[in-house]
Amino acid sequence: MTGTTDRAAGPRAYEAVLASIEAELRSGELNIGDRLPGERTLSEKHGISRASVRDAIRILDVMGLVRTATGSGPNSGTILISDPAAGLSSTLRLHVASRHLPVADIVQARILLETWAAAAATERPLDEPSLARAAELLARMDDPALDREAFHDLDSQFHVLLSTLAGNAVVSAMMESLRLSIMDYVRHSVTTDEQWQPVGQALRTQHHGILDAVTARDGELAARLLRDHIEWFFTQTSH
């Protein structure tokens, strides 16, 4: 068949593919790691153009549900994956940039997620490899020669890593999706070395206190220190 036209509704014809894939994932007909049929097959199955099929695949890619690769090997084609943070992250960053998601709301969301995760982590078996990785991140941040951009990246990794200790996949995905938005507001809050020096030193001290509390399995203290840490930075840099 050539030149298939969209029998599905208008400009959103690609939604037929999205709805079908969702239904097949729910039913178990499709599973993570499966390869989707080719453009022509999906076009004929749903009565839409191949351009609409490509639109659907692009949307699934942005949502973190497929990986596409050219070639003829076992990893070629469109493969179903699950990377929930990918779609959430790009969406959040754009909405924060549009100023319809206030930074204050991002800060409050961080507090809710991170304080809960810190308390929950202390009720689980000690994850020594992750704690060692967190300590390594702090050691790298303690380097006085580290530039602000590198610090912000390590800082966001530290907070995301702590949130994973709670063992909640949804919270971990949400924190990972917030990571770039957090980096953006942190980066734009302190723009000169003169401003950064006292702020950076305070953040280093606070980070060590938080990790010490988590390592000591004092969830209440860890949650309080995290709240104080996040609120302190926002208060210091939001005026």
Image (cartoon, rainbow, N blue to C red):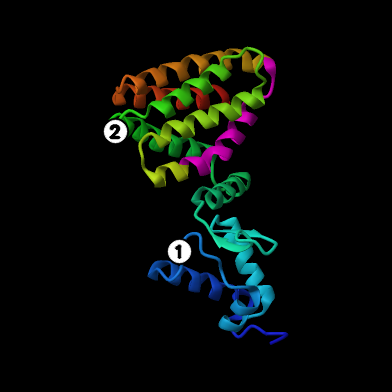
Q: Secondary structure at mark 2?
A: loop
Q: Residues within 10 Å of mark 2 (few under 14, many from 20)?
A: few
- Is label 1 or label 2 in front? 1
Type of amino acid under label 1: Asn
Residue at x 61%, y 79% (from the top left corner):
41
Circle number at residue 124: 2
Work out whether residue 13 can be spotted: yes
Circle number at residue 31: 1
Looking at the rendering, the stretch of residues picked out in magenta corresponds to 175-193
Q: Residues within 10 Å of mark 1 (few under 14, many from 20)?
A: some
Type of amino acid under label 2: Arg
Query: Is 230 rendered above or below residue 173?
Result: above
- Residue 181 shown in magenta: yes
Work out whether residue 190 can be spotted: no
Looking at the picture, tell me which residue is in the foreground, 40 or 233: 40
**Count of number-bearing discs:** 2
- Residue 19 as seen in the image, left or right of residue 48: left
- Residue 91 as seen in the image, left or right of residue 109: right
Percent from the top left, x then y, of residue 13? Answer: 60, 76
- Residue 184 shown in magenta: yes
Percent from the top left, x then y, of residue 170? Answer: 40, 47
